[in-house]
Image: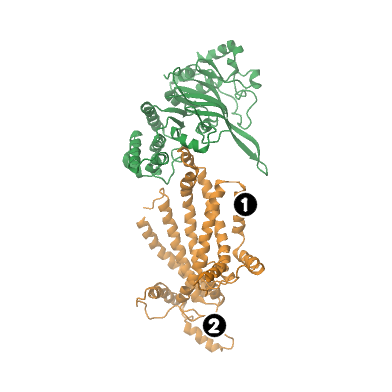
Amino acid sequence: MLTYTIRRLILAIPTLLFISFIIFLIVKLSPSDPTAGLPLTIPPEVREQIRESLGVNDPVLVQYFKWLKLMVWDEPLHLVEDWTGWQIAPDGPRIISYQTRSPVMDLIVQRMPQTLWVVGTSYIVGILIALPLGIISAYRQYSVFDQVGTFISMVGFSVPTFFTGVLFIVIFAVHLGWFPSVYDTTHEVTDWDSFVVQVKQIIMPVMVLGLYNASQISRYMRASMLDNLNQDYVRTARAKGLGERVVVLVHVLRNSMIPVITVIALNIPAVFGGAIITEQVFKVNGIGQLLIIAIQGGDVPVVQTVSVIFAVLIVLFNLIADVLYGVLDPRIRYD
Amino acid sequence: MFDTSNAKKLVEVRDLKMHFPIRSGLLRRVTGAVKAVDGVSFDIFEGETLGLVGESGCGKSTCGRAVLRLYEPTGGSIKLDGEEIAHAPFDKLRRLRPKMQMVFQDPQASLNPRMTVAGIIGEPLSEHSDMTAQARLDRIYELMDAVGLNRDFANRYPHEFSGGQRQRIGIARALALNPKFIVCDEPIAALDVSIQAQVVNLLEDLQGKLGLTYLFISHDLSMVRHIADRVAVMYLGKVAELAPRDGLYDEPLHPYTQALLSAVPEPDPTLHDEANRIILQGDVPSPANPPEGCNFCTRCPKVMDICRRIDPEFREVKPGRFVACHLYAEDTNQTAANAAEPIGA
């Protein structure tokens, strides 16, 4: 297992280099001008000087390798220095956002907690809803509970979150006035009242994303449970005289969780990526919103960096999902 | 040969019915039923092996599972050691489980792939007894010895074994709680011929040592002849004939049994040509829509008028020999004896 993991990690390096090159090229070669967002009163020769100072007139390959060196070496060291306080970061240039003129990594560090907090909570809520839903639906296949559950999860799966998000705002914020429509990230929880405010403002984004995740995972859970419920070993377990709870929750569930856990692991990068649209709908200033604003403003360094970080997370969690398979399923051995 | 005259009845099955509903249409209403087992009665005496034979789809396995109430039977009664199983509430059933166990057909699929051998064999022990972990492990090793598995394999997973070894795990698991009665549901069908003999001999050895009672379900007539004391022949959800082994194989009474036994290949090539096979015409009717009268009337070579109207009663025609056929009805006894003559002799 260890050799397998190490081999996969080594193989991930060329994959990620290739991905970073593609991302760099796509963003770089797109017809966007970093000075386009600046006031029109700036004369053309000044614009040209700004472009020159940003380094966008160098050959593309030169730009790529300069950026790559910053991306894989300088910026991670800065990140470590921020966390630990060790003086290890080099003094050279950093990847600077065109819009804010601050290092991209600082922006990401600032926005990551909001994303993890809101989207991460919604993911956990989604799993907590999905697992019992899938288990009961499968155990009572074709019952009313199953029919209703399957219908709701199909709706939740097919209706996009930017629609349900706005719908929730119209119903619960505008008409009923129960929850605020905007998520205030500057709010601090200090006592009970401010905690209630926090819960109120987080409910809507968490539920919108949570229901979407739940409908996806519950379908996997139900299908996987159904696969296993009809297996012969379940009959063996019943013949042993085990209680129905043990049969379903130990024998069937453990085997059914194998594919579901890998699906859950594969979707975790989406949590870091933030639900881009949903963050925008509820004005959560997380990573997703950062990416959208950067795309709109032609902020090439931010788009590149955030996209590469997503790519790294996706490759990493793919590996984790594969390793988890080997850990959970004794029939799979990687060595 | 097993003597049934002074033996005690361990299992009594009376008029067991197992119907599976057929649902169809938009609202999935019940529109019919597959009568997999339709009124089966038999006794199994303590210490004997009752063979249950029949062709594919005749309800053998369903019958075996229903006897252990792994299905909810539609009707009838099943008594194990005098205790009713068919309608027992769940808790009572759970307490009865240690007495009755099953060896399953597919040794791969019937073992939980995520449990080790020790886990599989030990689970019934932790569920139904309060052994300490050490006592349990000792018992697991004892069982592994009994079925001829190396003790070192206790921490391996089922997929690491061959088919014969897996079936041994299944047998060890079934034996864990010292059951009296074991249903062997085609335990050898999924195995190589060379392994089949080993497993059957193991089952016989264990029966001798532990005084087990088997219901041995198989489509392999020669194997049943080898292991069974009495044999029941099933056709389309009903028992056609039930008789002591030698009687049944030497002189089959029911026309279906005659046809079935004539299909056993004759290994001697000189005799092979003379073997007069009875070849049945047509297909087995659907168990969802069995024929009126006798189930076998559509294919029976000796079919009479009465067979198409009245379902023959399953009755004892000679001591220990039960058959469901109008040929042996009391008023036609004479013709029956004549009819059975050519093949029985």
Tell me the colour chain B is drawn in: green
Q: Which is nearer the eye, A193 or B190? A: A193
Name the chain under label 1: A
The crowding category of the residue bearing disc 2, from other C-alpha atoms within 10 Å (few below 14, some 14 to 19, many at least 20), is some
* Residue A245 seen from this side: yes
Marker disc for residue A148: 1
* Among numbered discs 1 and 2, the one appearing first in the sequence: 2
Q: Quadrant of the N terminus of chain A?
A: bottom left
The crowding category of the residue bearing disc 1, from other C-alpha atoms within 10 Å (few below 14, some 14 to 19, many at least 20), is few
As drawn, the chain in orange is: A
Q: Is residue A78 above or below residue B317?
A: below
Can you identify the residue that label 2 sits on?
A: A35
Residue located farthest toward the top when viewing the structure as drawn = B334
Q: Is residue B122 above or below residue A41?
A: above
- The residue sitting at 47% across, 81% down in the picture is A55
Image location of residue A113, percent across then percent down: 48, 70
Image location of residue A179, percent across then percent down: 60, 68
The three-letter code of the residue at mark 1 reads Val
Q: Is residue B165 above or below residue A292?
A: above
Decide if residue A85 is on the left or right side of residue B79.
Answer: left
Q: Which is nearer the eye, B192 or A239? A: A239
Residue A160 falls in image quadrant: bottom right
Image location of residue A51, percent across then percent down: 50, 83
- Front tag of 1 and 2: 1
- The residue sitting at 50% across, 64% down in the picture is A120
Marker disc for residue A72: none
Residue A11 falls in image quadrant: bottom left
SS label for mark 2: loop
